[in-house]
Image: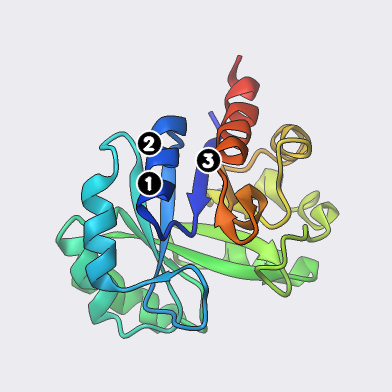
Amino acid sequence: MTKIKICGLSRPEDIDYVNEACPDYCGFVIGVPSSRRNVSVEILYCLRRRLSGAVKAIGVFVNAEAELPARLLQDGVISAAQLHGQEDEAYIRRLRERSGGKIIKAFSVESRKDVERAFASSADMVLLDHGKGGTGETFDWRLLEDCSGKAEKPFFLAGGLNPENIPEAVQRYRPYGVDLSSAVETGGRKDREKILAAVAAVRSMER
């Protein structure tokens, strides 16, 4: 059963859309001022209280001090920490020791070596995205053809996914989950209809 994650929630109405669509996960970009989807820890707590218990919250961090994701994991505010910066194996080990929580490490994919490097990570799961990240473009999925079937580590597929190409992505590459953000936005804001359509596209694969 392919999981679906809607990332970059920042407004109360975003939470309402997700509660209605009921994906498996949703993501919050925490403490990253350069991101237009950024939320402070204070806003995170407010949004988290509004979130349905059926949807697991994931915190997205970029080179944050390990204390921040560790605290949010320990407090149960997030179910996993997703790392999008230059966090290395030592950072992952330190965060795991401090929190005991699940860790997802994001990798930009431009070559097969990037895929191999991702699957060698000690993170619990990895996220594979377009080399430039945040562009709404897919990377060359053919880079997965020699690797994904052999990978024991669960991976999220991200970048340029939409209701039209999700079926191909799921059928051919069997990701643990798909991650969408800009694809479910209109004018830089989360779009209820697009979120519902994306979740429906994934759920239709289960029938």
Q: Are marks 3 and 2 in contact (CB under 8 Å)?
A: no
Mark 3 or 2, nearer chain start: 3
Above or below, comparing residue 11 to residue 113 in the picture: above
Residue farthest along the left direction in this orientation: 75
Mark 3 or 1, nearer chain start: 3
Q: Are marks 2 and 1 in contact (CB under 8 Å)?
A: yes
The part of the image, by quadrant, that contains residue 102 is: bottom left
Above or below, comparing residue 75 to residue 165 in the picture: below
Where's residue 48, x and y in %?
Answer: 26, 53
Residue 161 visible in rendering: yes
Residue beneath disc 1: 15
Picture residue at 28% right of the left edge, 63% below the top = 44
Tag 3 secondary structure: strand
What whole-number distance in Å separates the C-alpha atoms at marks 3 and 1?
15 Å
What whole-number distance in Å separates the C-alpha atoms at marks 2 and 1?
6 Å
Where's residue 39, x and y in %?
Answer: 37, 70
Three-letter amino acid code of the residue under disc 2: Asn
Where's residue 21, x and y in %?
Answer: 47, 32
Q: Which mark is residue 4?
A: 3
Picture residue at 59% right of the left edge, 50% below the top = 180
Q: Is residue 126 left or right of residue 65?
A: right
Where's residue 50, x and y in %?
Answer: 25, 46
Graded by Cα atoms within 10 Å as few (under 14), some (14 to 19) or many (20 or more), the crowding at tag 2 reads: some
The part of the image, by quadrant, that contains residue 80 is: bottom left
What whole-number distance in Å separates the C-alpha atoms at marks 3 and 2?
13 Å
* Of labels 3 and 1, the one closer to you: 1
Three-letter amino acid code of the residue under disc 3: Ile
Above or below, comparing residue 143 to residue 132 in the picture: above
Tag 2 secondary structure: helix
What is the total number of numbered labels drawn onto the structure image?
3
Residue beneath disc 2: 19
Residue closest to the eye, 196 or 74:
196
